[in-house]
Structures are given as C-alpha cells and as structure tokens.
Amino acid sequence: DSRMGPRREKIVVVTRDAAQAGTLAEALRRRGAEPRLCPTIAVTAPGSGAEVDAALADWAQVAGVLFPSANAARFFLERLDARGWGAAAWTGKRVAAVGPATRELLEARGVRVDRVPRRFTGADLAAELAAELPAPEGLAVVPSSDIAREELAETLAAAGWTVRKVLTYRTAPVPPPPEELARLAEADAVTFASPSAVRGFLAAAGTGFFRQHPRVAAVSIGPATTRALAPAGPPVLLEADPHTVDGLVAALETHFR
C-alpha cells in the first residue's frame, strides 16, 4: 500500500509559513495522511525593499540573477511588478534557480531559467556555477532573506564573480497555535522545509521534543535543514531525496510502509 494510512490516517505536522503550507498539505492529504498546519515561521517582505530597488536601478549592469529559494523569487518579482516591469525586463539576463519549485514559479511569470543544479541545494548551485561557467561580465544578483547563509555568494565571489546579495524577504519565528502545540505528541511525523522552521519549532516545543516522543519522525527537506535538527537528536530522522516537497512526501511514504 503506497498510502500513508493502511490502518489509520497518519498525522503529519506541517511547519511551513502559513501562506506556503497548502502544497505540502494537499500532497499529504492525497496520500491518505492528515496534515496539521502548525507554522513556526512567517515570511514577509523586508519593508522598504531598498536593496532590491538599488539592484533594479543598476539593472543594465546585471548579468544574471541567482534565486536560492522560491521565496526569493516571489518577493523579487513583486518589486519588479511594483515598477510595472514584465518578462521583457529579463531579456539578456541569465537566471538560475535552486530547484524545480523555484523554477516553476519563475517560468509561470515568463522568466526563462537557464540553470537548476543536479542536487537542489544552494551549495550545489554555487559549486556548479563556479566550476562550469566563467565569471560573467557584470553583476550576479542573489536575492536573499535576512538570515540566509552566505555560501552561494561567497563561493561565487571566490571564483571571481561580482556578486551583490540583496535583502528580498525576512523570516521570523512565530509561536504555533496553542491548540496545535498541545497536540504535537499525537503526531506521527513533523515536516521541516527550512532550517528556520526547525529553529521556530524547537523554540516552541523544546529541543527535547523528539527524544521525549521517539515515535514521532522528524522529516527534513534537505541537508541544511537536517543539520539544524542535530541539537534535537531525533531518534527517527528522514531526509527528502530529491530535496523537494515531492521528495519529502516520498520519504514519509517509505517510512510508513
């Protein structure tokens, strides 16, 4: 049985930002699980958007834009929309996306994506670009969050690229709804799509949650998120492969079988 609930519906907690949780929740529901939304982070615009606007003011010097997340793409495009810029603004620009969800978001808006890494992580995107492409003549813009790791920008800068990292969105922990926090011990698994979601969860539920409830699986979307879970020492720790929502759901299906 490929469904998650041959005996009963498996309860799977989704810790993503509330605005993004729907895709994962629906994928879980289709496979016979009961998703419970328990957001532990909130993703918002950075306020003035001054850094993105400064990069857009230098748009003629921009050779390419490298998107390390779907959120980076979403909020960056919102600033272009505010200027009334459409797909034509991307003519002559090379675009890289960290994975298929980011690529799909961009292509749905008419932005052609030239590169997606073979493994869907920022580290792999940086390594492939640095190894396989000459440094472009012009700026490589990296839209990022306020807590983003420096790995992508630093790797490319070390390879001779002129990189401008721009603050595009903010990520902040949020307290989960009290009623969901009280029901966490009923869960069969808790899913995490980012290190910040892990940190928000552990701040609310406690770093000892998974040791106190060893039956509950911790499910990570990728290596950086798995590293963030290390202090919690989950007895059952799964990692998506590939590092996508579909990979996360597949890891759960295999575990529950």
Image (cartoon, rainbow, N blue to C red):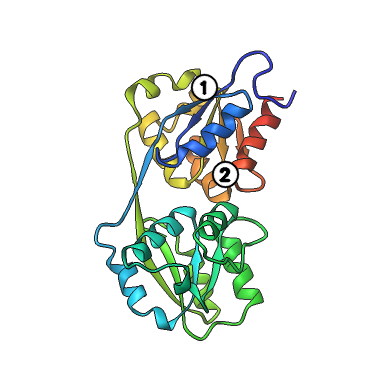
Residue 247 is drawn in which quadrant? Answer: top right
| In-image side of 54 versus 184 (left or right) | left
Sequence order check, earlier mark of 2 and 1: 1
192 above or below 109? above
Q: Quadrant of the N terminus?
A: top right
Instruction: Residue at the far bottom: name it.
Output: 137
- Amino acid type shown at disc 2: Ile
- Total numbered labels placed on residues in the image: 2
10 or 19, which lies in front?
A: 19
Residue 163 is drawn in which quadrant? Answer: bottom left
Q: Quadrant of the C terminus?
A: top right
256 or 216, which lies in front?
A: 256
Residue at the spot x=37%, y=67% of the render? 166
199 or 170, which lies in front?
A: 170
x and y, in percent, of residue 102 in the image? 53, 55
x and y, in percent, of residue 150 in the image? 45, 64
Mark 2 secondary-structure assignment = loop
Residue underneath mark 2: 221
Q: What's the distance in space between the residues labelled 2 and 1, CA to CA?
A: 18 Å
Q: Which dot marks residue 187?
A: 1
| In-image side of 84 versus 135 (left or right) | left
Residue at the spot x=59%, y=21% of the render? 10
Residue 234 visible, this angle: no
Mark 1 secondary-structure assignment = loop
- Amino acid type shown at disc 1: Ala
x and y, in percent, of residue 241 in the image? 67, 45
Q: Residues within 10 Å of mark 1 (few under 14, many from 20)?
A: some
Instruction: Residue at the far top: name it.
Output: 7
202 above or below 158? above
Residue at the spot x=62%, y=36% of the render? 249
